[in-house]
Image: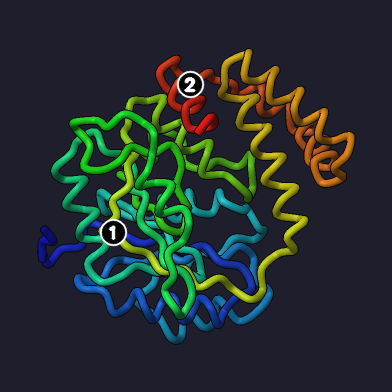
Amino acid sequence: MVSHTEQPRVSVVVITRDRVDELSRTLTELRTLRPRPPVVVVDNASTDTTAETVRNDFPEVILVRNRRNTGCAARDTGVARTDTPYVAFSDDDSWWYPGALESAADAFDAHPRLGLVAAAVYVGEEEREDPVNRRLVESPLEPAADLPGPRAMGFMACAAVVRRSAFDQAGGFGSLLFFGGEETLLAQNLAARGWGLCHLPDVHAHHRPSSSRPPGRWRRVLEERNALLTVWSRRSPRTVLTRTARAVARAVRDAEVRSALGLALLLAPRALADRRRVPASVERDLLLLERA
């Protein structure tokens, strides 16, 4: 049931870099939502007309300009500028359907342990279902009576809503990973602190992937690197050894994995300095998902 309170309970944080046309479309879509959510745009050091366009065409939006590209940590900067109990994330090529944010807020209000809602994602003009939807619905994790949907240990950052207090407690996205699979570390940090993550199929986000996306090789290298850094900083010693050995074996025949392993080793001191092993219950959930 969607409530229709006048006061928004959810803010939207959008991060962007050099994609002013896509950002304008996203902000136009967010402007149509009722109640209209407060929106914070964090500009990751764009060199186009992003800042001027937001100021001139969307004066209701809070604009934060970073002097350098801080990657996913820009979302933390945006959350710090919000004052609602819940915060939704959009990328500059994604937005929320009417009623989605209110449905998520109702779920948070009714379930005090709920820390994150992973939305259903619909892609492109044809509104096709993202494959992530089925994976979330068919989660092998045991249901929790105090959560309103299938439990999750992952999500898409452009289609997630968080409880502000849980996000802050978990340390946000942080600066270690920059981009590429950064959701995994936040999910594990939330679960380690007892917060529930779940999928709500009736909370919908739209994703229209930008035509100006980074090269696939660059993204794959970052995702492989970040997967290793996350394992090294949070997982059990057995998992650390197994996953590292697997990466070394793959690196022999895969140049991108080789690059990722080298980059991960450069950041290993930072990852190990922040090492906090997840509880055994979270490790079991992660192993179950990985086997599935």
Q: Residue at x 41, y 67 (%)?
A: 122
Graded by Cα atoms within 10 Å as few (under 14), some (14 to 19) or many (20 or more), the crowding at tag 1 reads: many
In this rendering, the answer to whether 243 lies above or below 50 is: above
Q: Toward the viewer: 220 or 40?
A: 220
Query: Which residue type carries mark 1?
Result: Val
Q: Which residue is mark 2?
A: 283
Q: Toward the viewer: 72 or 126?
A: 126
Q: Residue at x 61, y 25 (%)?
A: 233
Q: Secondary structure at mark 1?
A: strand
Q: Which residue is mark 1?
A: 203
Q: Position of residue 201 (x, y in %)?
A: 29, 55
Give the Cα separation between the discs numbered 2 and 1.
28 Å
Q: Mark 1 or mark 2, which is nearer the start of the sequence?
A: 1
Extreme residue toward the bottom, this view: 57
Label 2 close to label 1 by CB (< 8 Å):
no
Q: Position of residue 22 (x, y in %)?
A: 53, 78
Q: Toward the viewer: 58 or 116?
A: 116
Task: Left or right? Give the position of 92 relative to 62.
Answer: right
In this rendering, the answer to whether 220 lies above or below 55 is: above
Residue 267 is marked as: none
